[in-house]
Image (cartoon, rainbow, N blue to C red):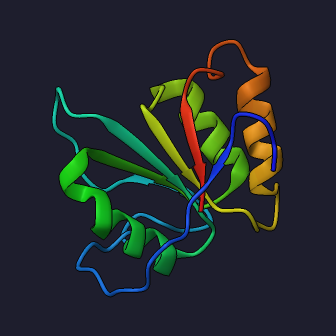
Amino acid sequence: MESGCTRMASPKMDTAADPAQGVSPASPAGTIAAEPGRPLILIVDDSPESIRLLSGLILDKGDVLFATSGEAGLNLARQRRPDLILLDVEMPDLSGYEVCRRLKDDPDTRDIAVMIV
């Protein structure tokens, strides 16, 4: 496991959140909720089903952004500076470990909490 990264098991359950809206090859990132003053959580996962599951579990904890690729996740993290990133391990473009390494190597994103799911 990479330094600065935490692995979290994800429980299996259905949720009502629908990240498939706004997720497409032309638009790999989206927002599920947006309220000022709430923690910002970024989910980076290539599976809309996993994004739906995770966002449903945490939607009441903060505003949720999502990206469907490692590169899109890195860009969103740099632009929005989330409080927490939930990061998939296996993605086609960049592995979760590589995304985490790049986040921790970047002075602008190294202090963002990352959990690998």
* 31 vs 11, nearest the viewer: 11
Q: Is residue 93 visible?
A: yes
- The picture quadrant where one finds residue 15 is bottom left
Q: Is residue 27 rendered to the left or right of residue 1? A: left
Seen in the image, is 56 located left or right of residue 77? left
Viewer-closest of 1 and 20: 1
Query: Residue 44: x and y, percent?
Result: 57, 55
20 with respect to 109 (left or right)? left
Q: Is residue 95 depicted above or below 98 in this figure?
A: below
The quadrant in which residue 35 appears is: top left
Q: Could you tell me how many numbered marks the image carries?
A: 0
> Residue 74, percent across and down?
66, 38
Q: Is residue 6 left or right of residue 43?
A: right
Farthest residue, direction top: 107
Q: Is residue 20 visible?
A: no
Residue 57 placed where, x, y %? 30, 67
Q: Residue 66: where, in percent of width, then height? A: 47, 54
User: Residue at image x 74%, y 54%?
Assistant: 96
Residue sitting at 70 percent across and 34 percent down? Answer: 4
Q: In the rendered view, tell whether residue 41 sits above or below residue 81.
A: below
Q: Quadrant of the C terminus?
A: bottom right
Q: Residue at (53%, 34%) from the top-left corner?
A: 113
Q: Residue at x 44, y 32 (%)?
A: 82
